Amino acid sequence: MRLGWGELLVILVILLLLFGAKRLPEIGRSMAQAIREFQRSMNRSDKQ
């Protein structure tokens, strides 16, 4: 399932309302770090 621009915009507006503009960059950084760590662990398990 792919999200279009309209769906992404609705999600962004909801996130802005829930967390506020000041917290969004912090949440984005922590999510990106979690995704990178997950990918690293998946790559390690594939190589074994």
Image (cartoon, rainbow, N blue to C red):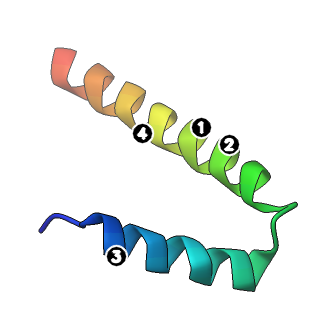
Give the number of the mark in front: 4 or 1: 1
The residue at the far front in this view is 6
Read off the residue under disc 4.
38
Between marks 2 and 3, how big is the CA–CA gap?
21 Å
Mark nearer the viewer, 3 or 1: 3
Which one is earlier in the sequence, the residue at label 2 or at label 3?
A: 3
The reply to whether callout 1 and callout 2 are in contact (CB within 8 Å) is: yes
How far apart are the two marked residues, 1 and 2, measured between alpha carbons? Answer: 6 Å
Q: Secondary structure at mark 1?
A: helix
Circle 2 sits on which residue? 29
- Percent x, y of residue 33: 59, 37
The residue at 81%/65% (across/down) is 21
- Disc marking residue 7: 3
Give 41 or 14, whichever is nearer the viewer: 14
Q: Which residue is mark 1?
A: 33
Residue type for callout 2: Arg
Which of disc 1 and disc 3 is earlier in sequence? 3
Q: Is residue 39 left or right of residue 30?
A: left
The reply to whether dot 2 and dot 4 touch (C-beta < 8 Å) is no
Q: Residue furthest left?
A: 1
* Between marks 2 and 4 in the image, the one whose residue lies nearer the viewer: 2
Label 2 and label 4: CA atoms lie apart by 14 Å
The quadrant holding residue 29 is top right
User: What quarter of the picture does the C terminus occupy?
Assistant: top left
Marks 4 and 1 sit apart, C-alpha to C-alpha, by 9 Å
The 10 Å Cα crowd at callout 3, few under 14, some 14 to 19, many 20 or more, is few
The type of residue carrying mark 3 is: Glu
Q: Residue furthest top?
A: 47
Rendered image quadrant of residue 12: bottom right
Badge nearest the viewer, 2 or 3: 3
Asked if the residues shown at circle 3 and circle 1 are in contact, with their CB atoms under 8 angstroms apart, the answer is no
